[in-house]
Amino acid sequence: MYRVGEGRVADSGFRVRFWGVRGSIAAPGPATARYGGNTPCIEVRCGPHLLIFDAGTGIRALGEKIRAEEPLDADLFLTHTHYDHISGLPFFGPAYKGCNRFTLWEGHLGAGKPLEDVLRQLMAAPLFPVPLNIIESNLRFRKFAAGDRLEPRPGVTIHTAPLHHPNEATAYRVEYGGKALCLAFDTEPRGAEPDPGVVAIAKGRTCWCMTPCSQTRNTPPTRAGAIPAGRRRCAWRTPPGWGGWCCSTMTPAGPTTPWT
């Protein structure tokens, strides 16, 4: 298991930092201190470009850190919009400053469901005291279809793939400076084989593969996707032919179990 914190993909100016790795619900406390108690948020630096993946509760602390870099022009990619992956967005401080600009990307909702509508529901009474339109930063919403190839910034290429998960989800392969980072959260295996979406983006010797602690292959199909992450364990290993590092996010909300 790669430790929560800051790492580097070789020496290409390609960096990754984990701000949240828990599934389902934030779980602070001594039992989760090793990898942190926040829900998913990953900071990726591709040279001068800031890419953020998911907006779980970890994004609040990320926001505090990057305020020193304002004005900001960054991209936020959502794997999906289950609550644990977006619940930190209303507490992302830089979003409330007009000098900043964020492009929000999603590829799982389909043509009939704008991301902006989902976030308005998240920040609507009686669930939240202030509406989405109080955010003063320049927000741009970009929709794509999982499977598309994206070029959000100069020199940055992102390949996407659909994942097997309730309400759909998207995997990302970020390529920069000859290196690649693969992110695939919240996906359930179908039988003995890995999710085809993970396989599609994760091959090659320059990859870091971040695969989910979602559930075991022995989970009954009728319960797939419905078991809280705190009660599941990861049953995945790096398949033959995959290179680079393989580390885990979506760690259970309870005490950490070593992943070997």
Image (cartoon, rainbow, N blue to C red):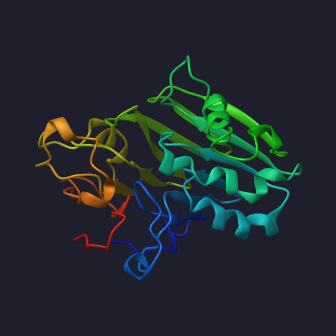
Give the x, y percent position of residue 142: 65, 31
Which residue is rendered at x = 84% and y = 61% of the image?
70
What quarter of the picture does the N terminus occupy? bottom left
Which residue sits furthest front?
126
Residue 106 vs residue 131, the one in the foreground: 131
Residue 196 vs residue 89, the one in the foreground: 89
Q: Is residue 218 left or right of residue 254?
A: left
Which residue is rendered at x = 57% and y = 51% of the image?
87
Which residue sits furthest right?
99
Residue 93 vs residue 191, the one in the foreground: 93
What quarter of the picture does the C terminus occupy? bottom left
Q: Is residue 124 left or right of residue 11?
A: right
Give the x, y percent position of residue 24: 41, 54
The image quarter containing residue 67 is bottom right
Which residue is rendered at x = 77% and y = 57% of the image?
94
User: Relative to residue 234, is residue 6 depicted above or below?
Assistant: below
Give the x, y percent position of residue 139: 76, 39
Give the x, y percent position of residue 223: 20, 40
Q: Is residue 247 left or right of residue 154?
A: left
The image quarter containing residue 229 is bottom left
Residue 239 vs residue 145, the one in the foreground: 145
Which residue is rendered at x = 68% and y = 39% of the image?
125
Does residue 174 appear in this view?
no
Number of marks present in the image shown: 0
Q: Is residue 20 left or right of residue 224?
A: right
Does residue 51 appear in this view?
yes
Which residue sits furthest top?
112
